[in-house]
Structures are given as C-alpha cells and as structure tokens.
Amino acid sequence: MDFISILSIFVLACFVGYYVVWSVTPALHTPLMAVTNAISSVIIVGALVASAAAGSPLAKFLGLGAVVLASVNIFGGFAVTQRMLAMYKKKEKK
Amino acid sequence: MEHVTSSPWVGLAYLVAGVLFIMALRGLSSPGTSRAGNRYGMIGMTIAVATTLVTHSIASLPEIAVAIAIGGGIGFVIARRIQMTAMPQLVAAFHSLVGLAAVLVGLAAYANPGAFGILHQVPVENLLEAVIGNGGAPVGFVNEIEPQSRIEMGLGIAIGAITFSGSIIAFLKLAGKMSGAAILLPGRHVLNLGTLIAILGLVAWFTQDESAWVIATITVLSFAIGFLLIIPIGGADMPVVVSMLNSYSGWAAAAMGFTLHNTAMIVTGALVGSSGAILSYIMCKAMNRSFLSVIAGGFGAEATASGGAAKEQRPWKRGSAEDAAFLMKEAENVIIIPGYGMAVSQAQHVLREMADVLKANGVNVKYAIHPVAGRMPGHMNVLLAEANVPYDEVFELEDIQGDFAQADVAFVIGANDVVNPAAKTDKSSPIYGMPVFDVDKAKTIFFVKRSMGGVGYSGVDNDVFYMDQTMMLLADAKKMVEEIVKALQH
C-alpha cells in the first residue's frame, strides 16, 4: 500500500472516531476509556510479527515483551469493561 | 516485504477487525447496547490476532502462546479484583502498558526491519570509479530502512514513550503513591520545550542517519518529557490528563500501523486518538480552562498560595444527621450531587440505601453529575452503577440544571468546586466561567464535608457554606450517610 492510501484510511478513521465518540453518552465515559485502551492494544499485531520472525534474537525478545504487555491490556481491558457495563441497570418497572 | 501483503484476504480481515472496533465504540451510545459493543471489540481483537498468526510463518508459537497466557492471566485477574474506586489508576496503568508496548514494537522493527517489510536497497557506488569518470554504476547494494518508515518509527516510539512515562506519573498520583499536588520545577517550560524540539530534530535526523544512538536518544528523551509533562499537574486536573494519555496511546498505535502498513492498527489508533482528544476537550470545557493551561500545570498550587491569607470568618450553620433525615423525609424532590469525596470514603453504597429509604417515603430522588466530578470522565457514574443506582436516575449537568428551582433539598456529598457560585459571579475567581450546579436555588442545602478547614481543589472559598439555607454536615461522608440512614429508619 502506498503512503497516500494509508493516510486516507487514517484521516477517514479520525472522522469516524470523532462522530462515533460524540455519540457516546457521558455516563459511559469510563467504560469508553477502558475499551479504547483494550482495542489500542491491537498493537499486539506488530509485537506478534516481531516475535515470530527469524533473524534477530533482540527483535524477538522485544516482541515477546510487547506481546505480554499488550495481552495484559487486551484481557484486562475487555474484562474490566464488561464488569463495569454489567453494573449499569435501568429502574425496575413496578 | 512479500509476506506482509500476501493475500487480499489478509487486508480484508484487518478491515473487518477495524469495523468491529468502530461498532464497539458505537455500542457505548447507550448502556443497553454497550454490552454487545464490548463483544464486537473482543471479536475484532480475536480476528486481528488470528490473522497475524495465520499469515506469518510462526517459528516460535509456544513462546508466543506462553507470552499471551502470562499477560492475559495477569490482566484478567487484575480486572476481576480491582475496586471500582480504583478505576482511574487502573486505566492510567493500562495506558502505560500500551505506551511501553509501542516502544518495544518500534525498537523491534528497528532491530529486524526485514520482518516488517520496511527495507529498501540503496545502491553503493564504487567511489574510485566515480572519481575517474567511469559513470556512477552501482557495484552493490546495502539494505536500509526506508526513510519514511524511519519517521513513522521514530514518532511512534516517541509518542509511546511519552504515554508510558506520563501514565506512570498519573498512576502514582491517582493511587496516592505520590503527592497529588502540582510539583513545579523552575524553568520547566523552557526545559519541556527544549526537550520536545530536540526529539523532533532527532526524528528528522534519523531519516539521514539510522545509527542506534539516534533512536536510543529519542527513546530516552521521550521517557523524560513524559515525566516532566505530568509532574506539574495537580490531582483534580487528572480527568484531562487521563483523557490526554488515552489519546496518545491511540496515536502511538496509529504510528506503528503506518510503519507496518496495517489497517486494523491505523483505524484503531485513529479511533482511540480522537476519542481521547474529545474527552480532553469535554473535560477542559467543563472546567472552563484551555487545554494548554492544564498542560502547563500548577493550577492548585498557585491558587492556594494566594488565597489562603485574607480569609474572613463568616458565620455558618452546622446540621446533624437527624436534621438531614427529618428535612429529606418531608421533601418532595431531593437532588444528590456526588464528588470525589464520595469515592474516597466509598460512600456510594450507603448513599443508595439512603435514597432507597427516601424513595420508599415517596421522595423523588435524582443524582446530578458534573463532567469533571471525580478523577476521570464518568467516574461518578461507574461508582453509582456499582451501588445499583439505576442509570435513569442519574443526570448530566444540562439535563438537571432546571430542576434545582423545584428541589427541596440539594445534598452535596464530597463535591465542592462544582457547586461554587463564584464560578458564575466572581470574575477574579480562578474557576470563573466553569459551569456549576445552581444549588443555591434549592430550598435547603446539605453539604457533607470532612471539616470547614479544607477547600476544594481550586483553593477557592465557597459561598454556599455561608448561605442561610445551608447546613454543614461535618463528618466523613460514609459515616454521615450511615447516621442519616439510621435516623431515617426511626
């Protein structure tokens, strides 16, 4: 992919993010932070490439370290978001 | 290189992951759809990880499996055990991990650029032949990292490092392991600006010279500026800081996505980056402060230094738990305004008990939440949800402002600056222009506070203390509410 198409994806995604996030209700801003934190750990993709590739023991070591860190975030982030969201309840109808 | 874009299906899979992440955020537009949204997020992440594992020749699957198991296990246990009041520091800690992961991935890409397909060949001219005029025919090639990838790599590492060290400081401050006060170093603006310029200069230099010292210096300086930037920012500005670091962790992921030409990372990075930026903007607006003035830091420190001296003694009334119980039982409408103090004393559960008793007596109870109440966006909402307060009893500032005129009782618990009328009237006040609750319109105000001595974060005295209809309930928030509940049941 050339730089311009990557840049296009990035800029469009910024706009999508802008509109989607404004529609998030303020009551859910804490879960929003927790879940964005979990999905930004998609950086694990890069960590996996580094730890899988042959050629550089240093890169592999760094990659595995990043895999551990990103996994803490992915599992922790989604689990804590789920825990929080499960608490939001409506008034019981009488 | 060839294996990075081996099949159109790979790109498609990452795109699907990106779309699922968008749907995860979209789900948060209401509590009802939010749980499904979170599941979309998990599916998206699974697709992204699986695609990467399937399309790369994995030489070390056991090691990777162990790494995921260790990290995942730690994350899962923390997520299950963490107390809801500790959520701000948990989020800060998680941000720091994203930042550090970005740094490690960036350095790994530097150490093994071939794996990421970011090498290009540079012809080496034979100098001797060039001199004797035999044309510039190349005699060989060396592999170098593409200059464009070096910029992306350098920026990604820099943003990641700032996110890491900044979040560590935010974590220490939020967890109370470090003074929450603003720590001001002399000449910090010059120092910060100098470091920032040095980092950008080095990233530019990196395109010319890919030596290890350049990338190492970028990393070290970025760690340093992260510390320097967050240290002078005080406790109640933390909502802005946490949102800002949230944003940075996104930009770091996006920069790495550029390096790796990976759509899922770019889309996610952009989403997270804009999300954090919007939250920072909302928080700044709710304090009527500019983003720059928050980042410049030192808010609390300066205000306390100047305001402490000339304070006159004004008469105020002390109320008791029985007074509060009696008046609220007789009331028609009660509005509860929680703040950080409620979180500190863990009063949310007993507060909900109090509301239950009042509701059983036919009182209409509502909760009013200021955008900057607590230490992170939405902090109070999560605590009330934890205490089983239905979310349709909880209102945002603009939705409840009109109700104070009909309210019989405004019950302020652990909040202060967000009800200070000086924000509306006193142009010299540091909080002037901040939107505040019109509690003074309520017939009676109960103000739960530990003592008369302390003032809010801004260090400004609050006229509400001295109003005719105000009764101060001086005690720990949890103990006071427990006593009120007891008195209500008699």
Image (cartoon, rainbow, N blue to C red):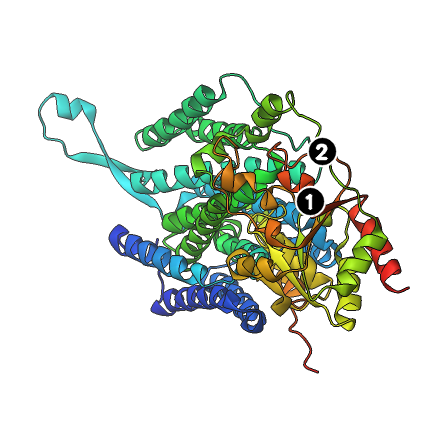
Res A57 seen here = no
Res B80 seen here = yes
Q: Which residue is mark 1?
A: B468
Report the amino acid beneath label 1. Answer: Asp
Which secondary structure lies at badge 1? loop
Q: Which residue is mark 2?
A: B454
Q: Residue at x 83, y 56 (%)?
A: B484
Sequence-first tag of 2 and 1: 2
Q: Residue at x 87, y 59 (%)?
A: B487
Q: Nearer the viewer, residue B430 or B391?
A: B430
Left or right: B142, with B373 as reference point: left
Label 1 crowding class (10 Å Cα cut-off): few <14, some 14-19, many 20+? some
Residue B385 location (% of width, % of height): 68, 63
Indicate whether B75 appears above or below B206. below
Label 2 crowding class (10 Å Cα cut-off): few <14, some 14-19, many 20+? few
Left or right: B455, with B271 as reference point: right
Chain at tag 1: B
Indicate whether B321 appears above or below A57. below
Which secondary structure lies at badge 2? loop
Residue B34 location (% of width, % of height): 56, 69
State the separation of the CA atoms marked 2 and 1: 21 Å
Indicate whether B30 appears above or below B207. below
Report the amino acid beneath label 2. Answer: Gly
Q: Nearer the viewer, residue B111 or B199?
A: B199
Q: Residue at x 43, y 31 (%)?
A: B215
Q: Residue at x 36, y 49 (%)?
A: B258
**Disc 2 versus disc 1: nearer the observer:** 1
